[in-house]
Amino acid sequence: MANTNNNKSLNVPILRFPGFTGEWKETTAAETCSEFKSGKGLKAENILSEGLYPVYGGNGLRGYTSTFNHDGFFVLIGRQGALCGNINIAEGKSYITEHAIAVQANTENVTGFFQYLLLNMNLGQYSDQSAQPGLAVNKLLKLRINLPSKEEQQKIATMLSLLDARIATQNKIIEKYESLIKGIAQSIAHSNKFNVRIAECLECSSSTLQESEIWESGYYPVYGANGIVGYLDNYNTQSEAIYIIKDGSGVGTVSYVTGKCSATGTLSILQAKEGYSLQYLYYLLKVFNFEPYKTGVAIPHIYFKDYGKAKIFCPSYSEQLRYAKLLSVIDNKLLAEQNILTNFGLQKQYLLRQMFI
């Protein structure tokens, strides 16, 4: 690829494949697409879990049905809801509903290129600011876009689609490791007789820390329901702990932390009693069924005083350590694969920024 640094006055991207030198043409989707319109409505009872043809809505695949209204490769723009502007694709015979805009380039352009061009445009910014955000087709058709030659479009689309395929493969690798960890933990948890109550293995404490008290920078990380939410210069966890979401949509989700850190008030802090491996207990709690212990309707809660009465299987301390070591080895491999996926995502973002105008 050629990095063109002296082209401030030229209508070209920063990064290009060698051999392409011409300026990109400013145009509109109306002038370059053979189709750019919403799909058609389909009753909910006609969308099934299995069927002949996939059904696509504003957020991608919704299910299957017995008929189709599109045949070919189309880029789909979600046109309604909080995620309006997101980009998906449909291939072959499919049914595209009114919640998605179907886009197909004309014969002088490449539909696959539009997939990444539209993704890079952050179309959600053009939604109307109502209770139900939405995108107007006529408004999108008039937006100014920049296109290279058909040959350069194809080159860019091919490279980015190969990167997407590698990302999809990486996701499958991660899913396999996650399934392996879950399967081993479930086998340990359910193939043996429950012999000890959770409250006999773990101590529970709570934090009163609010997110408004957290800084953007500091010495020690602070964990909330969605991971690290900020930093402080002090901490409420010194060595290792299990953090468990005690209320809200992610209630019952557990994480294992080490080192000096803190938890917000949305988390309970669990620590092992003498004779028990905290890491072993973490893997068991990952597959523990918290459903019977949830209370509340609008905002679900779990309380240690309730699920602490449940029994689990705990072998000897040495056996706990052996199981924990086995699962942590796989967990470390999973983390490495997740880091690879993150890097692929960063590469894609970089290419989208540098290879488009």
Image (tube, grey):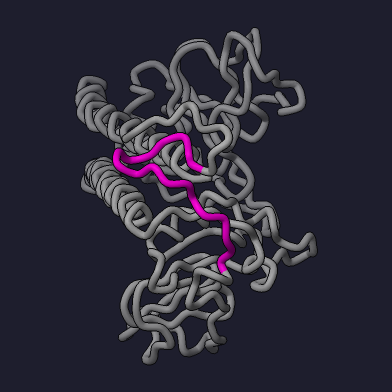
Q: Quadrant of residue 153?
A: bottom left
Percent position of residue 93, x then y: 33, 82
Can residue 195 be seen? yes
In this view, 126 is above or below 60: above
In this view, 64 is above or below 201: below
Can residue 285 be seen? no
- Say left or right for 27 vs 5: right
The span picked out in magenta is 12-29
Quadrant of the drawing holding the N terminus: top left
Main secondary structure along the magenta-highlighted residues: loop
Which residue does the image show at 47% across and 22% down from the upper left?
Answer: 241
In this view, 313 is above or below 220: below
**Observer-nearest residue: 349 or 130?**
349
Percent position of residue 245, x then y: 56, 38
Q: Is residue 266 magenta?
A: no
Percent position of residue 290, x then y: 48, 49
How many marks overall? 0
- Say left or right for 338 vs 212: left
In this view, 60 is above or below 200: below
Which residue does the image show at 48% across and 40% down from the upper left?
Answer: 13
Q: Quadrant of residue 234?
A: top right
Furthest residue toward right? 130
**Observer-nearest residue: 234 or 356?**
356
Which residue does the image show at 60% across and 15% down from the upper left?
Answer: 236
Percent position of residue 292, x then y: 51, 55
